[in-house]
Image: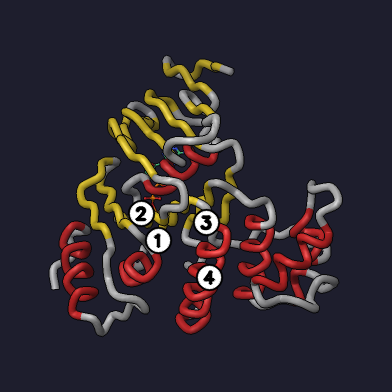
Amino acid sequence: MATHTGGLTLEKNKGRKESEGGGKAVEVRGLTRRYDDRAVLSDLDLSIEPGEFVALLGKSGSGKSTLLRALAGLDYDVAGEGELVVPANVSVVFQDSRLLPWARVLDNVVLGLRGAEERGRESLAEVGLAGREKAWPNELSGGEQQRVALARSLVREPALLLADEPFGALDALTRLKMHVLLRKLCAAHQPAVLLVTHDVDESIVLADRVIVLDEGRIVAEEAIELAEPRSPADPGFAAVRTRLLDALGVSL
Ligand SMILES: Nc1ncnc2c1ncn2[C@@H]1O[C@H](COP(=O)(O)OP(=O)(O)OP(=O)(O)O)[C@@H](O)[C@H]1O
């Protein structure tokens, strides 16, 4: 649906198509997005393989969330061009869990899914919350609420998981535990993942590939091929970190 404001043509989810299976999990071609004539994504190309984990780093305002919203089908207030092909089944996790406060934990997980209670219980067990099905969201810690958000995403077996700083509000120790959990969940479910993060070490620990965005363009890309378990103590880890920080304009 197109609307007109101030001479710009705004079109909901312009150029976004659902793939018919097979091929890449994500294919972005020539994606440009503008707010008030200012391009925040410029002619961006990106593809993600099925099951591939891609982390997206970039300074504040570099366009990370704009890209994620475009992939999620949530950019209805922005002008632009380009083509995006994404799977039909996409789940999104945000920095805040966005649980419904009036629904119990299990109901949050299976909301909108028919006959999925057993799968919902299994998902909660997978994220370490067996026995908490009947709790209310406000009875859980921030980390536990994010676990529920992950269970709610994964119970839908998404072909693409989009995560916008999902651990950004958690303390350092909880964040490390969530890294271990997310790696385990991704190994089990194999979604393609695009994770937006400000945390360079988090990107290296989790991703198969790290991309750096600056002013709406990809300025660096690193395939992460480190020995497991990945450790910041590994000299290879430190070398990747230095290159990524350099791309982010931070010199040590
Ligand atoms: N609704 C909007 N109207 C106008 N400008 C916007 C709007 N949303 C985002 N922008 C601008 O687009 C640019 C990119 O924003 P975006 O949220 O994608 O950045 P980001 O890389 O995710 O930043 P952060 O790391 O701070 O979340 C910013 O300069 C922002 O001010």
Q: Amino acid at mark 4?
A: Lys
Q: Amino acid at mark 3?
A: Gln
Crowding at mark 2 (Cα within 10 Å: few <14, some 14-19, many 20+)? many
Above-or-below relation of 102 to 48 = below
The image quadrant in which ligand 1 is located:
top left
Image check: 151 left or right of 230? Answer: right
Question: In the image, which disc is placed on residue 184?
Answer: 4
Judging by the rendered image, the residue that carries numbered circle 2 is 56
Q: Between label 1 and label 3, give the one nearer the viewer.
A: 3
Regarding mark 3 in the picture, which secondary structure is present there?
loop
Residue at 57 percent of width and 56 percent of height = 93
Crowding at mark 1 (Cα within 10 Å: few <14, some 14-19, many 20+)? many
Which is more N-terminal, label 1 or label 4? 4
Which is more N-terminal, label 2 or label 1? 2
Which is more N-terminal, label 4 or label 2? 2
Q: Is mark 2 within 8 Å of ligand 1?
A: no
Asked if the residues shown at circle 3 and circle 4 are in contact, with their CB atoms under 8 angstroms apart, the answer is: no
Crowding at mark 4 (Cα within 10 Å: few <14, some 14-19, many 20+)? some
Asked if the residues shown at circle 1 and circle 2 are in contact, with their CB atoms under 8 angstroms apart, the answer is: yes
Residue at 28 percent of width and 30 percent of height = 43
Regarding mark 1 in the picture, which secondary structure is present there?
loop
Quadrant in which residue 125 is drawn? bottom right
